[in-house]
Image: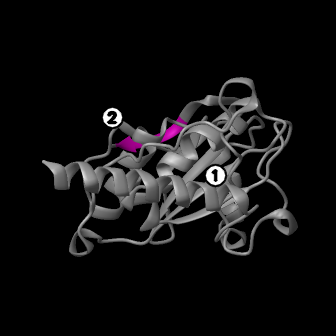
Amino acid sequence: MHQEQALQAARSALATAVVGLLIALPSVAGVQFVAPEGPEGQVAPAPVPVGEPIAAQRLRHKVHFIYMGGDDCPSCVVWRRAELPRLALSDAFRASRYSFVNKPILSGVPGLFLLPYEVKPYKAVLDQASGGNMGSPHYAILVDGVLQHYGFSAPPAERMEQMLRAALTDGRWPEPTRCLMRRPRAVTQCAESVPG
């Protein structure tokens, strides 16, 4: 029992240190973090990781998670403060490639010259999948370079971890369908979907 408590304390301390480091730097491996705030501007407690460990032999695919949102989008800022640090501690996130695209609310997928290098090859795919819609945030999950899901809004860390885990391991998709293209002028509606 004492060993379990010591292990839990060590994990908590490690999580606090990792998140503190990630927040202190403006960008680590392309991950953009915003310091979580607690009451009266105090730094919030360390995030609790989501998901279970994934054995290396269960990883079947290369997954690229592209998140598009900016500082002019309140829900994007909240997601990057509250959910991204928790998601970043998960095995599913660490086994995936993550790219942040700064996308203002009143724009579609940004121009090629504004995209990070690793996202540029997917510009046409993202344009088509977005349906040309504005609004933020948008996100895409690509598996082995092929779009598997295009979403609007950002799900909680637990749901995003489930999506990444399913994409990495050929597991069960956490939603009934995967959206491949958003309906033009109706970003919250899917124009083309496949069963989850």
Residue 178 visible in image: no
Label 2 vs label 1, nearer the camera: 1
Label 1 crowd bin: few (<14), some (14–19), many (20+), radius 10 Å: many
Q: Is residue 18 left or right of residue 100?
A: left
Name the spot of residue 57 as percent of width and height, x first.
Answer: 22, 75
Q: Circles 2 and 1: CB distance less than 8 Å?
A: no
User: Residue sitting at 87 percent across and 68 percent down?
Assistant: 113
Nearer to me, 24 or 56 = 24
Q: In screen coordinates, is 30 left or right of 108?
A: left
Check the image and report above or below for 155 versus 139. Answer: above
Position above or below: 42 against 20:
above
In the rendered image, residue 40, in percent from the top left (x then y), is placed at 74, 24
**Outermost residue toward the left?**
1
Residue at x 69%, y 31% (from the top left corner): 75
Please state, as top left, top right, bottom left or bottom right, where the C terminus lies in the image: top left
Q: Nearer the viewer, residue 124 or 61?
A: 61
Q: Is residue 18 left or right of residue 41?
A: left
Name which residue type carries label 1: Tyr
Mark 1: which secondary structure? Answer: strand
Where does label 2 land, which residue?
Answer: 176
Q: Earlier in the sequence, mark 2 or mark 1?
A: 1
**In the rendered image, which residue does mark 1 sit on?**
67
Q: Secondary structure under badge 2?
A: loop
- Rendered residue at 45%/65% (across/down): 94
Number of numbered discs on residues: 2
Whether 193 is among the magenta residues is yes
Q: CA distance from mark 2 to mark 1?
A: 22 Å
**Magenta region, residue range:** 191-195
Q: Main secondary structure of the magenta part?
A: strand
